[in-house]
Amino acid sequence: MAALDSNPRLRLHGVMSDDKPSLHAAYALKTPADNKRLYAEWAGDYDRGFAAREDYQLHIHTARAFVGAGGQGPVLDVGAGTGLCGAVLADLGVGPIDATDISAEMLEKAMRKDIYRDAIEADLNEGIPVPRYSYSGIVSSGTFTHGHLGPEVLPALLRVARPGAQFALSINAKHFEALGFATAFDKLQAEGRIEHLTLTPVRIYGDLAAGPNKDDNALIALFEKS
């Protein structure tokens, strides 16, 4: 496992917030600063608290869809968080996998799982600091769930993907039309930048989930970079 303090790309900030980490707080995120504050506090309890309590399933659906579409490494796990999706990918034999997230604290937890080759702290709005054409696969589970990021970051993902790279991006169904993902994908197809787009509906949470978001759905966008 890579040592975090030896990774020049990963810098821990120790940001704290007065907001209690919760699904409600996550859905209320508006800015990158809000995101950093919330997930800095949530990192320690995310897996056994949120993921287990809410019967979170989206990372499993996304990883399986990627592999089912023929996806292979090297893969960039976008919005990797604590490594839930990466762990499923690794179990399915995919690798190597790099993780990128805006939260250094989340990445610290992810790297402890010994499934990632590298951790890259990055705000997708500002791009991903890796060379062009670095990855044969791009996977994202949960990054486009809360509505604080829209299709404006898709070019940053395409930049680091090789021609023919397989994408599997989960997008909250409530945001797909409202935030312009449908229009963005139509434009990317018309411009010949992506191909073979399919949209698969899945449940974000399992049967054990409770609360106002328990029936939320997502669309897994599978496509290839042209």
Image (cartoon, rainbow, N blue to C red):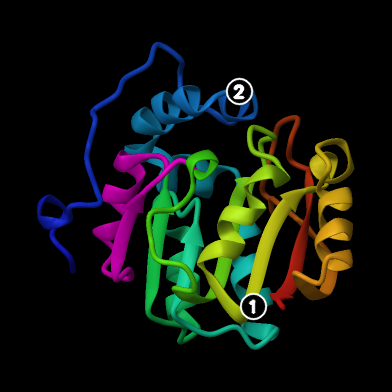
Classify the position of the N terminus by image quarter.
bottom left
What residue is rendered at 68% in x and 43% in y?
152
Horizontal side of residue 78 vs 7, given as left or right: right
Numbered label attached to residue 30: 2
Q: CA distance from mark 2 to mark 1?
A: 29 Å
Residue type for callout 1: Gln
SS for callout 2 = loop
Q: In the image, is residue 6 part of the stretch drawn in magenta?
A: no
Magenta stretch, residue numbers? 102-123
Horizontal side of residue 59 vs 88, given as left or right: right
User: Residue most toward the top?
Assistant: 18
Horizontal side of residue 8 vs 26, given as left or right: left
User: Residue most toward the front?
Assistant: 191
Badge 1 local density, few (<14 within 10 Å), some, or many (20+)? many
Residue 94: x %, y % from top left:
46, 83
The residue where tag 1 is placed is: 166
User: In this picture, is 139 found above or below 39?
Assistant: below
First in sequence: mark 2 vs mark 1: 2
Q: Nearer the viewer, residue 143 or 9?
A: 9
Horizontal side of residue 49 vs 113, given as left or right: right
Q: Quadrant of residue 140?
A: bottom right
User: In this picture, is 146 found above or below 129?
Assistant: above
Q: Is residue 56 among what the camera can see?
A: no
Residue type for callout 2: Lys
User: In this picture, is 86 found above or below 54?
Assistant: below
Q: How many marks?
A: 2
What residue is rendered at 89% in x and 65% in y?
190
Residue 154: x %, y % from top left:
66, 53
Residue 172: x %, y % from top left:
75, 46
What residue is rendered at 39% in x and 60% in y?
99
Q: Is residue 222 among what the camera can see?
A: yes
SS for callout 1 = strand
